[in-house]
Image (cartoon, coloured by chain):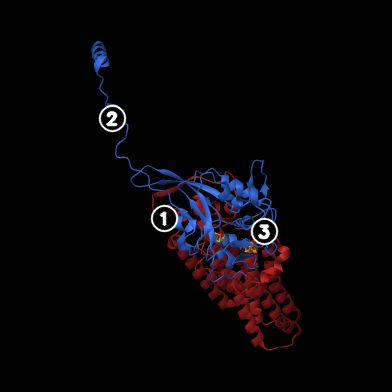
Chain colours: A red, B blue
Amino acid sequence: MNPAPSVILFSTLSGLGFGFLAFLAAGLVPVHGFHAFALWFVGYALAVGGLLFSTLHLGNPQRFLRAFSQWRSSWLSREAWAAVLTLLLLAPMALSDWLGFDWPRLWGIGTALMCLCTVFTTSMIYAQLKTIPRWNHWTTPALYLCFALTGGAVLAGQGWFAVACLLGLAAALLAHWHFGDRRFAEVGATIGSATGLGPIGAVKVFEHPHTGQNYLMREMIHVIGRKHARKLRVISMLLAVVMPGLLLVLAPKGPAFLLAAALIHLAGAMTQRWLFFAEAEHVVGLYYGQR
Amino acid sequence: MTTLPQSTTTKLGLVIDMDTCVGCQACVTACKGWNDQGYGAPLSDQDPYGANPSGTFLNRVHSYQITPEDAAPIIVNLPRSCLHCEDAPCVTVCPTGASYKRAEDGIVLVNEDACIGCGLCAWACPYGAREMDADAGVMKKCTLCVDRIYNENLPEIDREPACVRACPTGARHFGDFADPDSKVSLLSAERGGIALMPELGTRPVNLYLPPRPKDMMTASPLAPLLDIRASGFAGWLDKILGKIG
Ligand code: SF4
Ligand code: SF4
């Protein structure tokens, strides 16, 4: 799949944003007054900014309100609802922290869970697609949730809990790669089944229907990115897990180090998200003899 | 609504005969021609006469080489377009309700006025049947020529999809799969119509007829000609010339 920058920015930034907002809402970052306002602002900016990036890849973004209509069947529609509802319901908690109202934390804990639900709906947009076997697996929601929790925990300075999250993320990454590498074969689509000609003999492409590129090839057949997949896996593991982990454990406490750890983690998340797309093979590639 | 109808009483679709298709691309051209001026936004082209042409098509004809274990390789052409699946994943993923499957005849359509151009339906389709139009920013797909098949302004002979009408070898057939006595049902029953990528669970309505088995020749029919012995004058000449040589 084509790793479009707008989609990578959307899912990494809004994931980090909702993860961070969850920690704020649950009251795990003891802040008051202007300090609280600043942190909530960062959380909202990340989440909303990410969502705005997602509209960049729409052909007709001015009709976005229609995307709220099909929540009964569509994960994308559910995500739109979850994101907007969560951001609205978080607002009282933000006000309470900022202006010192001390409203009950139970509300915050509920909305923290909604933050995670929002990330889950994002992940299901990808995980539901049978046509992209690598994504069509439980490791996809696991990975998105781990990224959101870990990013949020690191940014929210959650100490040892952040380290535990980093370990969880490492496990989710390894699982996603381990199962992902086998998924295409497991689903069983081949050029033989795609053309229905497999029972007759070995099928190979003789001629493409068109000499140039088309939407399908640009969008769903991305062969170049996979060449460096191994190296990028190591890089994303180092950036997203190992380096922030070392910073959290070894470096002295302080907001500068937290920020550094969070930024390095975010760079790792973006690398991984790029790879998440670049490595994903769509079954339509079978018709073109390219995956 | 992007929930699918429970079942449809009519299931309009195509049978495409891979045995007779010669890959001439007439259906592609007819489709592009009709859909440039009918349903929804015209199918746009980008840089059509330049170095890197690209454009929106609802039908594309692939060619494959098949090598059976015990026979010579054969070339088969496969026109690929929307199969109007019964369990259409492209419909259920759509957030706006722009994609829908008609309860009355099973045709899968896009309401372009509601489409935000998110592209998710194209990701969900295993067959590459949907292409986003780069000019209009909306999703285009085969409409089964819904604006022809019911169109009483057209002579009756033209009330079938443009691709079917244009195919010079009669490799494309249009009809109702819900009716066991329709031409398409009979053809696919007789010739063993196949569903593409059944493992994806989409239950396509359109079916493809596999190439008929080719005759196997044990020896060349020309083989006796290789062993001609000259007789009469030619034989005498052959002998003399052979001696001189
Ligand atoms: S072929 Fe593709 S676009 Fe057509 S109904 Fe099936 S899944 Fe949808
Ligand atoms: S591109 Fe249009 S038709 Fe397809 S899923 Fe998005 S809104 Fe629906």
Residue indicated by mark 3: B138
Q: Element type at marker 1? A: helix
- Which corner quadrant of the image does residue A38 belong to? bottom right
Q: Residue at x 46, y 61 (%)?
A: B198
Q: Is mark 3 within 8 Å of ligand 2?
A: yes
Q: CA distance from mark 2 to mark 3?
A: 64 Å
Q: Is mark 1 within 8 Å of ligand 1?
A: no
Report x, y in % for residue A17: 65, 72
Answer with mark 2 or mark 3, whichever residue precedes in sequence: 3
Marks 1 and 2, Cα distance to the nearest angstrom?
Answer: 38 Å
Label 1 with label 3: CB-CB less than 8 Å:
no
Q: Which residue is mark 2?
A: B224
As displayed, is residue A119 above or below residue A190? below
Q: Give the residue at mark 1.
A: B190
> Mark 2: which secondary structure?
helix
Answer left or right for A12 relative to B243: right
The answer to whether mark 2 and mark 3 are in CB contact below 8 A is no
Number of other residues with Cα within 10 Å of mark 3, as a class: few under 14, some 14 to 19, many 20 or more:
many
Q: Which percent across, then down, holds residue A174?
A: 48, 66
